[in-house]
Image: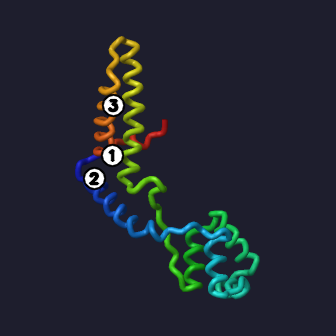
Amino acid sequence: MQRSQQKIAKLRRKQLDETYADIVPFLARMPRGGWVKDVRSALGMSAAQMARLLDISKPTLARLEKNEASSAITLKSLERIAAIMKCRFVYALVPDEGYESLDAILKERAHQVATNIINAAAHTMALESQSVSAARRTSMIEDLAAELAQNLDKRLWERK
């Protein structure tokens, strides 16, 4: 990858990570029946009233609410429903729990890939009586991982 593209990707990761710092504290688990039904009920809106506002049948609304609760609803439907309730639909991809940033995800993946590469090479070297010490292997893994992450090497996300 070209150096300028690498710098842009790194800057974008930093910008997203800063955004996540603002978003993550406000994340909530979806209510058991889904956000649509929960917010609608909290606003005192019946299913029949919402269906009329959306110009759909009550069974269609029930299906939409069920689909949302099972993560099978479309983003477009959620945007439309949110607008009816004078809400904003917010959509984001944020790092899983245990990862404080996109850089952390990238570094972990680079370490995994580097470990696989170095261990495969070390195995071959051992078969040829050219094995390296555990400390040297660890150093090689760390060096390769840093290089893979720095260059956004295509091997990072190859399927094995």
- The residue at which mark 1 appears reads as 152
Who's the residue at 31% across and 59% down the image? 14
Who's the residue at 39% across and 69% down the image? 22
Q: CA distance from mark 2 to mark 1?
A: 9 Å
The nearer-to-camera label among 3 and 2 is 3
SS of the residue under disc 3: helix
Residue 58 drawn above or below residue 66: below
The nearer-to-camera label among 3 and 1 is 3
Q: Hey, which quadrant is residue 112 in on the image? A: top left
Who's the residue at 37% across and 41% down the image? 110
Residue 129: image location, x then y, percent: 35, 11
Q: Which residue is most to the right?
A: 59
Q: CA distance from mark 3 to mark 2?
A: 29 Å
- The residue at which mark 2 appears reads as 5
The nearer-to-camera label among 2 and 1 is 1
Which amino acid does the dot numbered 3 rest on? Thr
Instruction: Identify the mark nearer the N-term, 2 or 1.
Output: 2
- The residue at which mark 3 appears reads as 138
Residue 85: image location, x then y, percent: 58, 84
Q: Which residue is most to the front?
A: 135
Which amino acid does the dot numbered 2 rest on? Gln
Q: Are marks 3 and 2 in contact (CB under 8 Å)?
A: no
Residue 1 drawn above or below residue 100: above
